[in-house]
Structure formats: C-alpha cells, structure tokens
Image (cartoon, grey):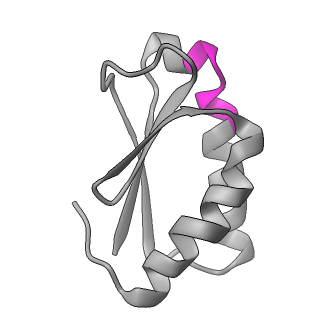
C-alpha cells in the first residue's frame, strides 16, 4: 500500500492542505484506489515556507498548491501504485 502524507500543521493548513487532501481523496476515488493508497495527515517537516508539504512514500514534495495535485497524482502516484511500491 502506498502511503501519502499531507502536512496539516498550522502553516500548511493556512496554505491549502485541506484543499489538497480533498483533491487527493477525489482522485483516489476516481481511480478506485481506496485499497492501494493510504492518505494520512502529518505534522511539520520544517519545509513549509512556500506551500504545503506532501510525502508520497518516502519522497517529499514541497511548496505544493491545490492546483499541483493533479499532475503529481498522474506523474508520481499512479506509477508508484502500478509498480507496487511499498511505503511507510
């Protein structure tokens, strides 16, 4: 199962983590990946100056905005799920 963690600390929350979580949830449902992806909230990675931090497996993405989610999902998350990468 692939684990995706979205920072929900105060800085990231103010920068759109709630919207990012909602977008990821929608994409998980759209691609019927509920049994392959675990979406979790987490707290600060100390890299949230420009936007929300999102971890996909062990890869950390910084400065993520809600409009970035679709591209990250299609370019990083779908291939990781299809390859069966196991994560935290």
Q: Is residue 30 above or below residue 27?
A: below
Q: Residue furthest bottom?
A: 83
Image-based side of 40 in relation to 17, left or right: left
Q: Is residue 78 magenta?
A: no
Q: Is residue 20 above or below residue 27?
A: above
Point out residue 3 in the picture as x, y percentages from the top left corner.
Answer: 36, 61
Q: Based on the displayed image, in which of its 4 quarters is residue 67 positioned?
A: top right
Point out residue 77 in the picture as x, y percentages from the top left corner.
Answer: 52, 68
Q: Main secondary structure of the magenta part?
A: helix
Q: Which residue: 45% across, 69% down?
A: 37
Image-based side of 36 in relation to 86, left or right: right
Point out residue 87 in the picture as x, y percentages from the top left corner.
Answer: 26, 67
Range of magenta residues: 13-19
Number of disc labels: 0
* Quadrant of the image containing the N terminus: bottom left
* Quadrant of the image containing the C terminus: bottom left
């Amino acid at each position: 199962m692939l684990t995706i963690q979205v920072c929900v600390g105060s800085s990231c929350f103010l920068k759109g983590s709630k919207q990012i979580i909602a977008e990821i949830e929608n994409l998980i449902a759209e691609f019927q990946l509920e049994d392959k992806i675990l979406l979790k909230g987490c707290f600060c990675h100390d890299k949230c100056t420009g936007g929300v931090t999102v971890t996909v497996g062990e890869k950390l993405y910084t400065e993520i905005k809600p409009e970035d989610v679709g591209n990250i999902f299609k370019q990083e998350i779908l291939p990781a799920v299809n390859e069966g990468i196991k994560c935290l």
